[in-house]
Image: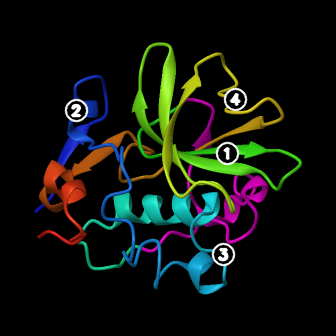
Amino acid sequence: MSKLLRVNEESQAEYIPRLTSAGIRGNPYWYSRNPFYQAGYGLPNCTCYAWGRFWENSDINADFSNRPTLSLGNARDWFGHTSDGYERGNIPALGAVACYNNPRGGHVAIVEEIHDNYLLVSESGYNSFYFRTSRIGVDGDYWPMADDVFQGFIYNPITGGGGWLYKRPWLWKKELYNREQWLIR
């Protein structure tokens, strides 16, 4: 049974941020079961990555259930796709999708760590970089690039959107990201 923990300064230690690409290649969250990959828009691609990471964080039983209902369009459309049922706002939360509009179709990234003066996000770039982490300044706009316009955050209800965090032993173990085996139970 999953244990619920209140999301606050102490519980950030329970969320294991993805800081490397270990375990992504071939993983169904980003490949065979990811709708962006299936449509020919697999990694490197910010939407494929963010959709897969959001799902990885919310798949409580590690059985590929609880598929996200995030937008299947360009990144710039994700924040406005409110029919997905996820809460939105302008305050960062662990596991949330940071959404941007820009002339290139937008950008999405996942909040991995929250610090006093910056956010650490994980991301991929369309036809560019496969995976990286980036520090985003906390100046109210959370801009990763000069022409990005910050839209807001889409909250993952499992990792902090509703104020609660599920502690799932199969996901919270650091060794998950040190192995090519992406399913630990």
Q: Check if mark 3's residue and mark 2's residue have beta carbons within 8 Å.
A: no
Q: Which residue is mark 3?
A: 41
Nearer to the camera, 169 or 120:
120
State the residue at coordinates (84%, 53%).
104
Quadrant showing the C terminus: bottom left
Distance, label 4 to label 3, CA atoms, is 24 Å
Residue 33 point in image, percent of width and height = 46, 83
Q: Nearer the viewer, mark 1 or mark 4?
A: 4
Q: Up-down: is 182 above or below 82?
A: below
Distance, label 1 to label 2, CA atoms, is 24 Å
Q: Check if mark 4's residue and mark 3's residue have beta carbons within 8 Å.
A: no
Q: Which residue is mark 2?
A: 13
Q: Which residue is mark 4?
A: 143
The residue range painted magenta reads: 67-91
Type of amino acid at the residue the image marks with label 3: Tyr
Label 3 packing within 10 angstroms: few (<14), some (14-19), many (20+): some
Q: Which residue is mark 1?
A: 99
Nearer to the camera, 95 or 132:
132
Instruction: Answer with left or right where residue 155 lies relative to residue 143.
Output: left
Mark drawn on residue 10: none
Distance, label 3 to label 2, CA atoms, is 33 Å
Type of amino acid at the residue the image marks with label 1: Cys
Distance, label 2 to label 4, CA atoms, is 25 Å
State the residue at coordinates (70%, 29%).
143
Give whichever of discs 1 and 2 has the lower sequence position: 2
Nearer to the camera, 66 or 75:
75
Judging from the image, what secondary structure is the residue with disc 4 in? loop
